[in-house]
Amino acid sequence: MNKYPILLPLILLSLSVRTIAQSQKGDIILNPQIIVSQWAFRSDSYSSFQHYDIGSSFHYYFSNKLAAGLYVDATYSNYTAKQANTFSRWDYLISISPELHYSFLSSRFSPFLRVRFGEFGYIHQYTDNPAYPIRQRSIGNFLFNLPTIYGLYLGLGCLYSLKNNLAITAQLTSLPLQNGIWENSTVGLGCQFKIH
């Protein structure tokens, strides 16, 4: 498992801290990201797994540090079979989740915490497994996952402002499970724009 993407947020910790105008009450922020998964290009003797993910946070600041909004995500996953007794599968997912954002500092460099809860969207799956009838090889379903204590995506990241309305961000996000294991750990790299 490639652990180097986890180090990316730590790199920004070495950047200098200088006070500038930061997000204020009433600001609207757009933060698109490219998501780097730890399992993005995993391969074994049975199959290879490719994962591509883009997402964006959209927040409204109720105070200088606290914001609420939505997270929109689009994901493509491809499981390619390597052996005759295995089968390929493709997944497409579009989802939206409520999200809270809290900034710890009002400076050029600012760590932040984000919490996503619940997931609503649509997933489409296709497999080339001949055991399924042709009409059942391609199916789509709507997602409606209500928030639970073990369904909260926790994101810890950092922001570095390039100017008053533009910043770069790095965010580590993970999902805690009931057995104490953290799953679906990803790193998101993106830009943040102040649009109001």
Image (cartoon, helix red, strand yellow):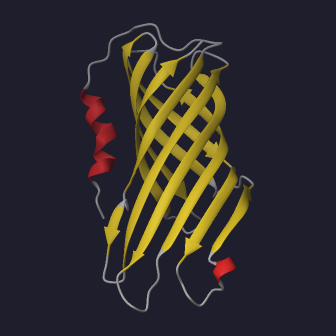
- Identify the image quadrant of residue 185: bottom left
> Percent x, y for residue 123?
64, 60
Q: Residue at x 51, y 67 (%)?
A: 90
> Percent x, y for residue 10?
30, 38
Task: From the viewer's perspective, tell me whether residue 185 is left or right of residue 14.
Answer: right
Q: Nearer the viewer, residue 92 or 40?
A: 92
> Percent x, y for residue 27?
61, 14
Q: Is residue 73 above or below residue 183?
A: above
Q: Residue at x 41, y 15 (%)?
A: 107
- Identify the image quadrant of residue 188: top left
Q: Nearer the viewer, residue 75 or 35?
A: 75
Q: Residue at x 50, y 73 (%)?
A: 89
Task: From the viewer's perspective, tell me whether residue 99 is left or right of residue 128.
Answer: right
Q: Is residue 148 above or below residue 170?
A: below
Task: From the viewer's perspective, tell me whether residue 61 is left or right of residue 4.
Answer: right
The quarter of the picture where the C terminus appears is top right
